[in-house]
Image (cartoon, rainbow, N blue to C red):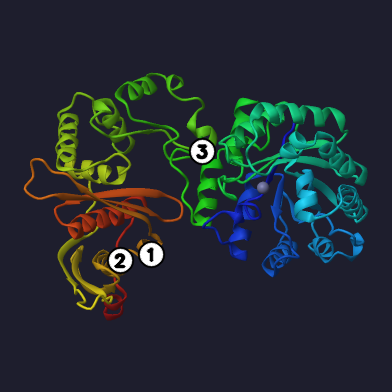
Amino acid sequence: MNKVLLLDSTVRDGAQSVGISFSVQDKLKIARLLDNLRVDYIEAGNPGSNPKDMEFFELLRSHPLRHAKLTAFGSTRRKHIAVEDDANIRSLLAAGTECVTIFGKSWDIHVTEILRAELEENLRMIAETVAYLKASGKEVVYDAEHFFDGYKANPDYALQTLEAAVQGGADCLCLCDTNGGTFPDDVYEATRLVAARFPVAVGIHAHDDSGMAVANSIMALKAGAVHVQGTLAGFGERCGNANLATILANVQLKLGVACVPPDCLERLTHTVHEVAEISNISVHKNTPYVGGNAFSHKGGMHVDGVMKNTLTFEHVPPSSVGNTRRLLLSEVAGRSAILEKVRAFCPEIQKDSPEAAHIIDMVKQMEHQGYQFEGAESSFELEVRRMLGKRTKFFELLMLSVLDEQSLDGGKKPAYATIKVLVGDQLEITAAEGNGPVNAIDIALRKALEVFYPEIGEIRLTDYKVRVLDSESATAAKVRVLIESTDGSEYWTSVGVAVDVMQASCKALMDSIEYKLLISNAVPKQPAASAANA
Ligand SMILES: [Zn+2]
């Protein structure tokens, strides 16, 4: 194995994922990200089936991809018509791509029961469609739909369908586990046989219904496949397609086959999160290589081990895929993890200094009150800075008042928040309306502070979690609010704990804003009104 070609189908197969609905702009953004990652093929939908897809191809024709081959996707010609008379095939050509993926039936029951065609006719449909596209100058990837199920049910026929594609001149036979039910040993055996029998490149397209999609893809590569299909973040029909990010990292770091330049692999984590963001789906924290927890260490023994030698609890260096190591802050993590965190923004802290002891005490105290800094490191940093006298006072909240009228007839009424903030020696009083009190506070805070700090406009809240803490000792139950924010390039989480959900939210919101100002090295601007007066 010295070369593996990657085909990403996020904007085609991935678009069939529950909860995903891409606009043309979304698809273009994803295609550019994949192109920058240097995947070899980017597959998009059938231009004939939907005008949105045709627009996508047209826009990419005027601003082509730099590296990847754009690939249009469609099926073999309809039964009993000439291939050149098939409107779908004509629109595939009209997409003007260098490469075309054509899927055809390999499983006899799909031919007889779904297409209601004769087995012989299906073979002609495959061979004629591939030949026609080849004669039109296209590179053709033939997707053998349901190949593994078809091979199990009727191996002779499944192989005849591949033979038909080879006769048509297909450049690649991509074996599909469309229903995702095949096991890796069966994928290995069948792929090995196909790779030995046909003189063309073999590929794999796996779905994850048995949790085997990545394993099946790797086994196919080991059996002689050289082309692998998936979706970067694993999005796709039902349980999803094979996760191409996991496959890429495995192939490059474990099998030693360079698919993309190392600096592209170092952008993998960022790219997966960007694609997920555009898709409006969050990446599971425990996703291999790129998830937020992929290199997080919590147990004291693990933290201690990693700090002595990272090999002890990490299979690859997190930086190789652009992820970062996180030592989680919690009582179980212990003193050394907490101080390691502090060192990231305060390198001079000494292990046995009184400041270190105070920080450890503070964490214990705050955890006892219900704070959880695990995954809320921005609030942790702000608290430690405050304790060490290193916190920049960007603003001060002087007053907050919320009016949340309850409608008696069950209808919806907006909530109002009024706040007074001090920035330097400037006072700003702002009121805002929101759908709910927390939303109103958020809008009011931003409105008041954006006057001084325009960078606040970049913050978006991506998650808001409220948890009621069971309190054995406290007189009233407390709530913990965790807020996840992003400015498009950084992600951070802040936390607030109080007996009142509004207070806890307000604390977490203020920490989120303050952290953004801290990482932006923000300096307050003069408000426009006073500048005009000056
Ligand atoms: Zn598929």
The amino acid type of the residue labelled 2 equals Arg
Could you say which quadrant of the image residue 344 lies in?
Answer: top left
- Foreground residue, 4 or 149? 149
Gap in angstroms between the C-alphas marked 2 and 1: 8 Å
Counting every numbered tag in the picture gives 3
Residue under pointer 2: 446
Does any atom of ligand 1 lie closer than 8 Å to the CB of label 2? no
Tell me the element at label 1.
helix
> Are the residues at dot 1 and dot 3 in contact (C-beta closer than 8 Å)?
no
- Which part of the image, by quadrant, shows the C terminus? bottom left
Residue under pointer 1: 457
Tell whether 187 sits left or right of 403: right
Q: Which residue does the image show at 25% across and 27% down from the upper left?
A: 334
- Foreground residue, 278 or 107? 107
Tell whether 51 sits left or right of 21: right
Residue 305's tag is none
Q: Which residue does the image show at 54% across and 46% down from the upper left?
A: 272
- Which part of the image, by quadrant, shows the N terminus? top right
Q: Position of residue 37 (x, y in %)?
A: 62, 45
Residue 337 visible within the image: yes
> Are the residues at dot 2 and dot 1 in contact (C-beta closer than 8 Å)?
yes
Tell whether 382 sits left or right of 64: left
- Foreground residue, 446 or 199? 199
Callout 2 crowding tier (Cα within 10 Å): few <14, some 14–19, many ≥20: many
Residue under pointer 3: 322
Instruction: Indicate which disc, 2 or 1, sits on the residue closer to the N terminus.
Output: 2
Q: Position of residue 245 (x, y in %)?
A: 58, 40
